[in-house]
Image: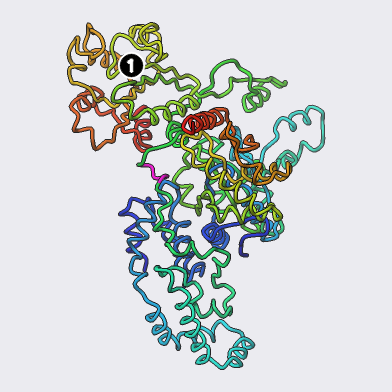
Amino acid sequence: MFLPFFQALRAHQVPVSPREYLGFLEAVLAGLATYDIDGFYYLARAAMVKDERHLDRFDRAFAASFEGLEAISFDDMVQAMDLPRDWLEKLAEKTLTPEEMAEIQSLGGFDKLMETLKQRLEEQKARHQGGNKWVGTAGTSPFGAYGYNPEGVRIGQDRSRHRRAVKVWDKRQFRDLDGDRELGTRNIKVALKGLRKWARDGAAQELDLDGTIRATAEQGWLDVKTRPERRNAVKVLLLLDIGGSMDDHVQAVEDLFSAARAEFKHMEHFYFHNCLYEFVWRDNARRWTERLPTWDLLRSYGSDWKCIFVGDAAMSPYEIVLPGGANEHWNEEAGQVWLHRARTQWPDNLWINPAPEQHWRYTQSTQMIDQIFEGRMVPMTLYGISRGVKLLG
Amino acid sequence: MRFSSTKDYIAGDDLTMAVNAAITLQRPLLVKGEPGTGKTELARQIAASLGVPIIEWGIKSTTRAQQGLYEYDAVSRLRDSQLGDARVEDVSNYIRKGKLWQAFEADERVVLLIDEIDKADIEFPNDLLQELDQMRFFVYETGETIRARHRPIVIITSNNEKDLPDAFLRRCFFHYIQFPDMETLKSIVAVHFPDIKPRLLETALTQFFEIRDAPGLKKKPSTSEVLDWLKLLLAEDLSPEDLRRDGASALPKLHGALLKNEQDVHLFERLAFMARRQGR
């Protein structure tokens, strides 16, 4: 019955599998959400979305699949109430105790019940006319309304009315959490966590219980073994483009930087302008006085460092290919020579580009750098960085 | 068994639905959200609302899945064997039950809170897959299988420091606790401070949301911070007028409860400086 909805979720790239779908059906069959569109939405969300990044996509898929529900008017509902009488009676016989049946009879039997129900619906209709959306008719279930079905869902009684005016999934409150959108510090941290590699390093301080037991069993006396603690052994060299066209991306780069700094014990950062040349610097205010030759960089940081360039790669093509092409000083060797050197020294390299990916093909220099990096250029989104982290291995 | 808002805890419809679905279908419920939105408190409130005991298992970076099941204290046994203790003969004397075992063998259904699962090693959730799914595990040392007498209600919280494996997620229900809006926050405050003056509350919350909305904050204050702050305001017995910021600073009174790092405090001082310059 909900298969089209399931398909819509897949089409909106919410990663749902049949397992979630079956779990969701199970929940519906258990009677967790009947006659209540909000409850149904919450249930479907809890069962099928496993990550807040996908909530927004889920909302869109839900809106697309259940759009028609708004079209059902109250008159239709009231009319429809005439139909399932037989069904209702049968159901009642099955589920109600004799005493409860007697109680219904004392209220005037099913006809009376249905009439009261219609009346109630009319009242509700009048009350709701101020709103322009159909959401919130949880009380229209005959069983719920009369309280015969203790399993019936009666939630949403303490909520304020104004929140019902707009459907929850139409508000799209989770847009910020979608992984393809720009990211905050925390999100980047999560992405960078993929780079963590635990290794035992340093002085032997920790008691190695398993080793001690084994050694003791072999020796016949207590033979205490120790081992080094586990630490994050990944070393990261961050080279940041600064100034010029990068000004638009300062905030994003700052976020990446602060996230990366908190994440790695071994992290070094240096700045360059537009393209890597013979000098880099660490303090931007003293960039002309305290420069560090790039050769020193290549010599001091071993091949086990992971090298991440951050830059929008937007510059004149001459700045990459020609000696003397740099726009601030005379460079003896072309930018691409330095880039190749860096790539050879640090085989685990990556270029993170804060400019939106769809704009890349309009900038010639971006394509050139992408070629130099053999496709290892990723956009600065959560998915981009996750992809990059995988490339770095 | 059905969970709803308690007198100490306001749960939205979505949260209530997620909790009830997890209870009914006996699946673990994974709760995420900003720090301070009441993830851990949720498990305690579920236990209180259903009137069942709670078993809390706080996870640290060094926690291993096995510790939740049981630990075999080989060192004690070795020592006892050298002292000639009679207990040595029975290996079960040296098996220490973990939180999961305790939850499994409880006489009634319990709430099992696995707090901050993302702190642990990346393989941790995978190691618990079968145990949480089948609600049973095997003790190698004694050769017995421990089965849950009553499937516990499992609540798992995560601060998103690590991605959880897909296979694990598939077995859970998921809920993301959002930061409450003004109305919800008011009802939450009403639960904690029933006799706060409405005008003070209004002023305080408006200021609070202003702070939260300020761009560039490193750590946004959250529900638990606002509750602490109001507690301080009440303890100092401030009136709404006192709360109004004086010209010299854009920082609200007793901001220490809200802003947790010096960069954020500086940010607000800068904003105040700019506001003053414009005012002149």
In front: A148, or A4? Answer: A148
* Left or right of residue A5: residue B46: right
* Left or right of residue B160: residue A269: left
Q: Residue at x 22, y 8 (%)?
A: A333
Q: Secondary structure at mark 1?
A: strand
Subunit bearing disc 1: A
Segment colored magenta: A176-180
In front: B160, or A319? Answer: A319
Reply above or below: A175 against A126: above
User: Where is residue B94 drawn, in percent x and y?
Assistant: 73, 38
Quadrant the C terminus of chain A occupies: top left
User: Where is residue B208 drawn, in percent x and y?
Assistant: 57, 44
Quadrant the N terminus of chain A occupies: bottom left
Assign the magenta stretch its main secondary structure. Answer: loop
Q: What's the amino acid at mark 1? A: Phe
User: Where is residue B226 drawn, in percent x and y?
Assistant: 62, 44
Reply above or below: A215 against A328: below
Residue at numbered disc 1? A272
> Do we see residue A26 in this rendering?
no
Q: Residue at x 82, y 28 (%)?
A: B83
Q: Residue at x 70, y 60 (%)?
A: B51
Q: Residue at x 39, y 85 (%)?
A: A79
> Do we see residue B223 in this rendering?
yes
**Residue A380 is drawn in which quadrant?**
top left
In front: B144, or B232? Answer: B232
